Amino acid sequence: ANSNRFVIQSNGTTSTAGNLDVGAGCDVTGNITATGDLTISSATPKIFLTDTGDNPDFVVKNQNGAFTVQDTTNSVDRFVINSSGNVTMGGHITSGDITLSNSLPTLKLNDTNNNDDFEIRNDNGTFTIRNSTDGNDMISVASNNTTTFTGNCDFLAGIDVTGAITGTGDV
C-alpha cells in the first residue's frame, strides 16, 4: 500500500491522501476546482466577491438566518431573503418583466410615512385596486370587462360614451 500522505510533484503539484486541514487560512492564486459540496460554517458565513478592477464589491452571506447580498463598497443590502421567505431588494429593476404567481397575486404599495396604503391584485380573475388601509376595493375590472368604481368617480374633462347609457337615478 502507498503510505505517501503528502506529496509534492516535480511540477509543483501538491497531493494529499485524505483531508487537508489548514488552521491559519489558505491563499490560492488561480482557479479552484472541486467536486462535491462546499460547506462554510460560522456564526455569519460569508463569501466575498471583490472586483479588483472596478466597484462595487459584494459579499454573499447568511446573517441571522437571512440570505443577503450586500454591496460592501456602499454598505447597502441589495437583496435579502429572510427566514419567512420574504424578499427585500434595494435598487431598481431596469429591464424585464415582474411576474407574481399565487392564488391571489398582489402588489402591495405601503407608504411608510402616511396612510392610505394600496394593493393591485388579481382577485380570482378580477383586476382590483384596493385600499388596503380600510379594506375596500376602489376599482375592479371583471373578466367580462365590466368596470366598477366604488364611491364617487370624478371625471375632470368630461365623459365620452359610445353606445347606450343605462342608469338608475338621475342622468
Image: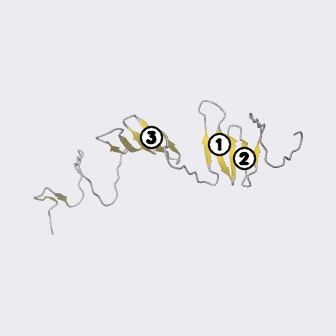
> What is the basis of the colouring in this image?
secondary structure
Residue that appears at 36% across and 35% down: 73
Q: Position of residue 41 (x, y in %)?
A: 35, 48
Up-down: is 96 above or below 13?
Answer: above
Mark 2 or 3, nearer chain start: 3
Q: Which residue is mark 3?
A: 78
Q: Residue furthest left?
A: 10
Q: Quadrant of the N terminus?
A: bottom left
Q: What is the three-letter code of the residue carrying label 2? A: Ser
First in residue order: circle 1 vs circle 2: 1
Q: Residue at x 18, y 59 (%)?
A: 15
Residue 14 in percent (x, y) is at: 17, 57
Residue shown at 33% from the left, 44% from the top: 49
Q: Are marks 3 and 1 in contact (CB under 8 Å)?
A: no
Kindly identify which numbered label has been placed on residue 119. 1
**Residue tagged by mark 2?**
140
